Amino acid sequence: MTIREYKNQIIKTISSSASPQLDAEILLCHFLNYNKTQLLMNQNQELSDATKTKIDDAVARRATGLPIAYITGHKEFYGYDFIVTPDVLIPKPDTEILVERAVDVILSMMDARGENLLTVCDMCTGSGCIAVAVAKTLLEDERVPAEQLPKFTLADISEPALDIARRNVAALLGDRPDSTLILSRFNFVRTNLFDAISEAIKYDVILSNPPYIPHTMVDELLQDGRSEPRLALDGDITIDGDRATNDRGEPADDGLAIIRNLIPQAAAHLAPRGSIIMETGEYNAEATAEFAEAAGFNTEIHRDLEGQLRVVEIY
């Protein structure tokens, strides 16, 4: 069977996917070690039985709803190739808005504060995609010498997630001539929000993509077999691991339980003139901003690529 014939067969098998043709091309490129141009140039190539068996297994898993990124172990985010496993959320394009804003804020702070190294915390770091994308973007800016790269703390409640974050830092920042210096700027902390971080430690910038999806929406998302960790999605689970309740004692379903705890904890660890930049849902961004304003902060909400309220900046 040729690559072209097999691609058509894959498309039929995973026709329920939102993007069967793209999925088929990604799987073929991954297992054949081709880029898209090479795939097109070799579409009349015959597939070996061994290769086809490997791809058959991947196609079967994709047909169950398992995301492509979990099958290939990789996902592009902000132009960089990240390692992903079912232990972490798959990086989403909307989160790139948070990275863009974080880079702008950090560059402005660097201009204002001279040679003093800034400190950045990426709370609920997951794969580490936010912190790593911010760091790589800063290092690609000619205004930022490696010696001025901020110190990054990547924090998460999940040790398996932190392992993936460590791998991404090493893979994406460890191949530079100055990698020893760069890697020394990264610290990893297993913690339930800020519980394991000393009250004396303050950060100039706190970044976070916390669990913020309402409980019933998580149920719907996970029904399609996407297999992302509920712990990283469900915003209605308290920091003690229980289902949150509303003012009437009913199970909460607004995705704000973690955020209600995160904002005051982050505020306590924020350096003077610091900023908190947090991803939220379009359905609870305004409520998040109201929590922050009630605590005495100013806020600004940034929209995502589809024009939805997405990133809340708190300062």
Image (cartoon, rainbow, N blue to C red):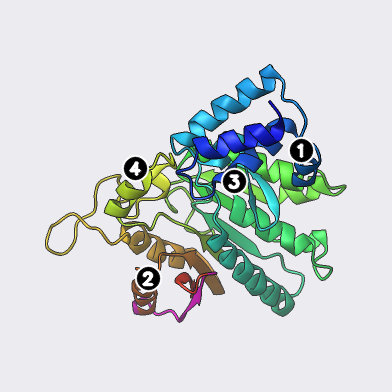
Amino acid bearing label 4: Gln
Residue 230 sits in which quadrant? top left
Range of magenta residues: 294-305
Amino acid bearing label 2: Thr
Disc number lying in front (3 or 1): 3
Tag 1 or tag 4, which sits nearer the N-term?
Answer: 1
Badge 3 density bin: few <14, some 14–19, many ≥20, Cα 10 Å: some
Residue at x-position 14% and y-position 57%: 250
Assign a secondary structure to mark 3.
helix
Distance from Cα at disc 2 to Cα at disc 3: 39 Å
Assign a secondary structure to mark 1.
loop
Amino acid bearing label 1: Tyr
Asked if disc 3 and disc 4 are in contact, CB closer than 8 Å, the reply is no
Badge 2 density bin: few <14, some 14–19, many ≥20, Cα 10 Å: many
Residue at x-position 57% and y-position 67%: 97
Residue 162 in magenta stretch: no
User: Who is closer to the viewer here, 189 or 72?
Assistant: 72
Distance from Cα at disc 3 to Cα at disc 4: 23 Å
Residue at image mark 2: 288
